[in-house]
Amino acid sequence: MNIISQVTDSAPKYIIYDFGILTSRIHEWLSSMMNTTWTSVVEMVLIGVVFLSFYALVGLILVYAERKVCAFIQCRLGPMRVGPWGIFQTIADFIKLLMKELLITRNADKFLFNVAPFIVIIASFLAIGTIPFAKGIQALDFNVGVLYLMSVSSLGVLGILLAGWASNNKYSLIGAMRSGAQIVSYELSVGLALMVVVIFAGSMQFSEIVQSQATGWWIWKGHIPVIIAFVIFMIASTAETNRGPFDLAEAESELTAGFHTEYSGIKFAFFFLAEYMNMFIIASIAATVFFGGWMPLHFGNFAAFNHAMDYIPPFVWFFSKTMFVIFLMMWFKWTFPRLRIDQLLTLEWKYLLPINLVNVVLAAFIVLMGWYLI
Amino acid sequence: MIEAITGIKDSEQEYFINMGPQHPSTHGVLRLVVNLEGEIVKSLVPHCGYIHRGIEKMCEKDTYQQVIHLTDRLDYLSAHINNEAVCLLVENALEVEVSDRIKYIRTIMAELNRIASHQLWWAAFGMDMGALTTFFYGLRDREYILNIFEQTTGGRLLQSYNRPGGLMNDIHPDFVKKIKEFIVHFRKKLPEYDELLTGNVIFHNRTRNIGTLTRENAINYGVTGPSGRASNFACDVRKKYPYSAYDKVDFKEILFTEGDSLARYQVRVAEMWESMKILEQLVDGIPEGPFMMKMKPVIKLPVGEYYQRVEAARGEFGVYVISTGEKNPYRVKFRSPGLANLSTLNHLSPNVKIADLVAIMGSLDLVIPDIDR
Amino acid sequence: MTGIVEYIKDVFGALKSLWTGMKVTGYYFVHPKEIVTEQYPENRETLKMFDRFKGELTMPHNEKNEHKCTSCGICEMNCPNGSIEVISKFETIDGKKKKMLDTYIYHLEMCTFCDLCVKTCPSSAIEFAQTFEHAVWDRSELTKKLNKQDSVCSKDIKE
């Protein structure tokens, strides 16, 4: 039964909020009523429902947040009409998208055209399971969590490629090709940047990476190599989610809307939602790996300070860190011009990858010498 | 397989895309038929005429006063400057000497219009490059100028402020004060433009050495205005053939030698600084005098051919009129800078990427109604 | 070696230029007073157009239902695209046959707001109003009759 994590380590005294107790109670209660198979089935369904609703909620909030952030950056107010400060705007948009007609271009590959948005959304849904929201709240806690996340999050590009190909639109095809080239190269940098922290933490399991930051976040403890890794991770993962200055697959001023030119209604909404969910996943991974995830702010051995910080619930820590990273990504996006496709590949192969390789060696050396900052 | 069906070899197949008439970065209804090889543009054919309204023909039925409202609608971003060309032509043909006040106000208005046009261009160019925020900053600053226009002329985009022999209204009492406020505001905001785009490494890489136009080609194609001056072609009509009050002000003709998209960008940003200098020199010393000279209600030009050129925001704008002595012109031809600038696109585009094509088009600053007329 | 130095300089120069741009946008994000949005339908009361704003052509009438138009037709002649139609009638006042305004038709849908009619009117009978909400459901509503019912020219009364 490893669907619900049961990290039963010696429970250091600074962890106040342990949701593992709650989940194991539910588990015990369910097992007292039915046999093991049914228990796991019911648990899977429960987790699925919780994550689906969470998924939709986060999507709605992020779309609203993005619109407000970009509005403030651009000296505007953003949505103001639906509800106070326009907070129901995304719900109104969602209803509008639901009611729109679903169009398919003539000679489009109908099956692939319809299946592409689902691939994109399933890929992001698979990735969300590994994220530790708080102690004990994590659907999948693999010992190779980082590896799993890497492999799953790169599935999304398949959907984009299929969408571009099946649309039977020349602009879409160019967008899909760009996206393919982009993801193949930037996967490397994302992986290597995460590898730096894996070297420091000594584990690929997300719960253990979080635990290893109980005495200080890696961005502080691991100093230079982790900061470099963070910058590279931000650049590469923004590129991987087709956002910000790397939105070449969409490139509205060049390719009108790139791979989703021909999509309308709810199928377009799927692409849209998946983009924001990918942003959330990337941000939460960055928060988990570099900023300690749900772990409160701890400084070495200042017991009183650390204890005071523990009273802030882990959800608050996790989401505030994630929101900070998301804001950073939005800030990029609304500031920079878009790169050209060859410059994008140059950036990866000539700059990010060499720096990353040197960085991994540097990290290994620092771990070897034990030069942590505490 | 396609080879078996059509008999065309794979290597000979061509990938055409239609950029426009509805495309976000053609800024209107220009249609480019682009022949692609992957991302790379092999050749390109611009198709004009989607917004052809026959303005030159319409001018033939109008009196000289009425032509003004049509020249507004050629290059709507430098409407005032186009109007000035027609007015100068009529005044020169009738040998009317307008008062200094008219000359000063016309020059101030033209420079304001030039700044407004460059602001919009900067905003849209940033957007073409993918930096959407620039669009709002550019338009925000342009609003100040539009308010000045609206207060004095009653129109924001199309002012119809000039008339043969003078101006429609006298300037608003707040005119001078507002321009001074604008200069103070814009001197603070213009460095932000540089911080956002000019110094940005992504922007630099996107525009440097893209669409390089040599001086010879610039002259051969008749490229004028900022695009020509970026190729070191000194073509500023304000310097070469001063009109209105341009002989009374001191300003620099911005020249760059590179001729690429970045140089065209830098010329325009530098021109905004120069225009502000011109404004500062003129705005305090607007002389007293009539804002409209005594003209006959029905203007009839003497028989003959007339040509008048002015420096519009995009280059040399010329009006050519044949008069048979009637109250309306026999034939009107506008020399619009946009068409000449567009004609270089064929020369600049081969072997660039699609993204570069957008950058080149943006840096040439095309206004489609100006091209199609 | 110089190559590596150049390379590192490139990287840091690039990062610095990106940071300069982000400072600008970041400044606006934390300074909400720089927001320039006008919330249009809400600010109807305070929204005032400039005096010279050309909204639509009107013919002012005084309280005695008099206008100044003598039906001379100069505005119609000067209008570049036929937005104005002046229909006059002949009436006999004190034994004299006089040209009087019957209907003054203004096509808002064709008007280009060039201001020639107002500027050339010899008796200042027409002027531009500062209204700007011209949207209607039917195009025919844009064709307007400017003189009011049973109105007369103030000059005719005096004589």
Image: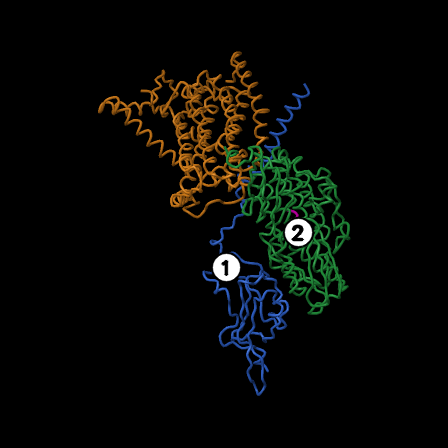
Q: Which residues are magenta?
A: B180-184
The residue that disc 1 covers is C133
Residue A251 percent across, percent down from the top left: 53, 38
Is residue B113 placed above or below A43 in the rendered structure?
below
Residue C52: image location, x then y, percent: 60, 61
- Can you say which quadrant of the picture contains the N terminus of chain C? top right
Residue B61, position as x, y percentages in the image: 64, 65
Describe the element under mark 2 as helix, strand or loop.
helix
Dominant SS type (magenta):
helix
* Image chain in blue: C
Which chain letter goes with mark 1?
C
Give the spatial CA distance, label 2 vs label 1: 28 Å
Q: Using the image, determine if residue A84 lies above or below residue A203.
A: below
Q: Nearer the viewer, residue B58 or B296?
A: B58
Type of amino acid at the residue the image marks with label 2: Leu
Tell which subunit mark 2 falls on. B
Residue annotated with mark 2: B112
Q: Residue furthest left?
A: A33
Write down the colour of chain B.
green
B257 relative to A348 in the view: left or right: right
Q: Position of residue B321 (x, y in %)?
A: 71, 60
Displayed quadrant of residue B70? bottom right
Rendered colour, chain A: orange
B230 left or right, relative to B192: right
